[in-house]
Image (cartoon, rainbow, N blue to C red):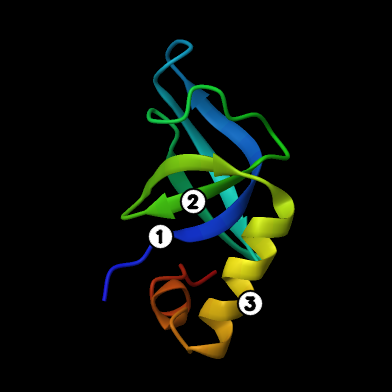
Amino acid sequence: MCLSIPGKLIEITSQLDETFRVGKVSFDGIIKEVSLTLVPEANIGDYVMVHVGAAISVIDEEEAKKTFDILMQLDELHELEDNEPEG
């Protein structure tokens, strides 16, 4: 099943211009690089919904935490852990 997962934008790692940016997003401690092209309004500290490597919307912290908790209860976050880089 493909889901969008909420995470916190913690760093902008690459920026060509105001639109084409890449950032690091934390999913409860698991860090992934994602495209921020679809959310030019996103700032460090914002929560974003991420689907297949791209942030697709900015959401508030309360909604992000509720959604993440539900996904944890449903055991739908295994894809994050399966793709975590070893290091």
Label 3, label 2: how far apart the Cα atoms are: 14 Å
The image shows residue 57 at horizontal and vertical percentages of: 47, 40
Q: Which residue is drawn at 49% across and 72% down?
A: 86
Q: Where 74 falls versus 8 (above or below)?
A: below
Mark 2 and 1 residues: CB-CB less than 8 Å, in contact? yes
**Crowd class of label 2 (few under 14; some 14 to 19; many from 20; radius 10 Å):** many
What amino acid type is highlighted by mark number 3? Answer: Asp
| Mark 3 or 2, nearer chain start | 2
| Mark 1 or 3, nearer chain start | 1
SS for callout 1: loop
What amino acid type is highlighted by mark number 2? Answer: Met
The image shows residue 6 at horizontal and vertical percentages of: 55, 58
Question: Which one is in front, 54 or 81?
Answer: 54
Which residue is the site of mark 3?
Answer: 69
What amino acid type is highlighted by mark number 1? Answer: Ser
Residue at the farthest left position: 1
Label 1, label 3: how far apart the Cα atoms are: 13 Å
Mark 3 and 2 residues: CB-CB less than 8 Å, in contact? no
**Tag on residue 49?**
2
Q: Where 67 falls versus 8 (above or below)?
A: below
**Crowd class of label 3 (few under 14; some 14 to 19; many from 20; radius 10 Å):** few
Which residue is the site of mark 1?
Answer: 4
**Crowd class of label 1 (few under 14; some 14 to 19; many from 20; radius 10 Å):** some
Q: Residue at x 56, y 23 (%)?
A: 41
Question: Which one is in front, 35 or 60?
Answer: 60
Q: Where 57 falls versus 82 (above or below)?
A: above
**Tag on residue 87?**
none
| Mark 2 or 1, nearer chain start | 1
The image shows residue 51 at horizontal and vertical percentages of: 36, 54
SS for callout 2: strand
The quarter in which the C terminus is drawn is bottom right
SS for callout 3: helix
